[in-house]
Amino acid sequence: MTTFLTVLQVIAALGLLNVWLLRFNRGTKYRGGSASTMLEEFATYGLPSWFAYAIGALKVGSALALLAGIWFPSLVLPAAALVGLLMVGALAMHAKIGDPLSKSVPALAMLVITLTIGWGSLR
């Protein structure tokens, strides 16, 4: 079980780092509305640009904590819980603007992954 959870931690962390560091200014089919960048997506949700940077800092920090959690297990549960909470927020934003369910798949998948990580870290 430990190896499985470690793999999930790495998958979640690399996924977050990919979105927030490599794809921040690039379009994907999962961006809210018709946004082509992260700042446009937050604007689509009616959120200020500074909020995108705040959420990004939380997600990047959580990703790094998930990676560090491989060696420092006490970091895993708080990081997974924070990412899970942020994914609930992401799902709410997609629902708020009436996005099709397909645009919520990454957030839903990350929520399931972080719930699994969190549950596993309690065992």
Image: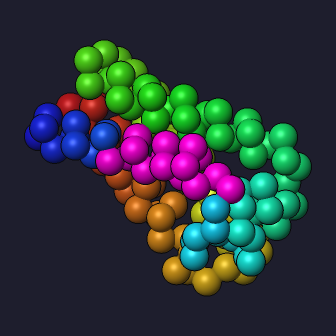
Q: Position of residue 31 (x, y in %)?
A: 64, 69
Residue 20 in percent (x, y) is at 58, 46
Q: Is residue 77 visible?
A: no
Q: Main secondary structure of the magenta part?
A: helix
- The colour scheme used to paint the residues is rainbow
Circle count:
0
Residue 59 in percent (x, y) is at 57, 39
100 sits to left or right of 113: right
Where residue 28 appears, as percent x and y from the top left, is 58, 70
Location of residue 103 by image quarter: bottom right
Verify whether residue 14 appears in magenta.
Answer: yes
**Residue 3 in which image quadrant:** top left
Which quadrant is home to the N terminus? top left
Relative height, residue 49 to residue 64 (above, below): below
Q: Residue furthest bottom?
A: 100
Can you see residue 105?
yes
Query: Looking at the picture, does residue 108 appear above or below residue 4?
Result: below
Work out whether residue 67 or residue 108 is closer to the camera in this orientation and state it: 67
Residue positioned 73% across, 76% down in the render: 33
Q: Which residues are magenta?
A: 11-25
98 left or right of 106 in image: right
Relative horizontal placement of residue 94, taking residue 80 as reference (left or right): right
Which corner quadrant holds the C terminus? top left
Q: Residue at x 64, y 68 (%)?
A: 27
Q: Is residue 79 above or below residue 19?
A: above
- Residue 24, above or below 26: above
What residue lies at 57% left-to-right and 76% top-to-bottom? Answer: 29
Q: Residue at x 38, y 56 (%)?
A: 112
**In magenta segment, residue 52:** no
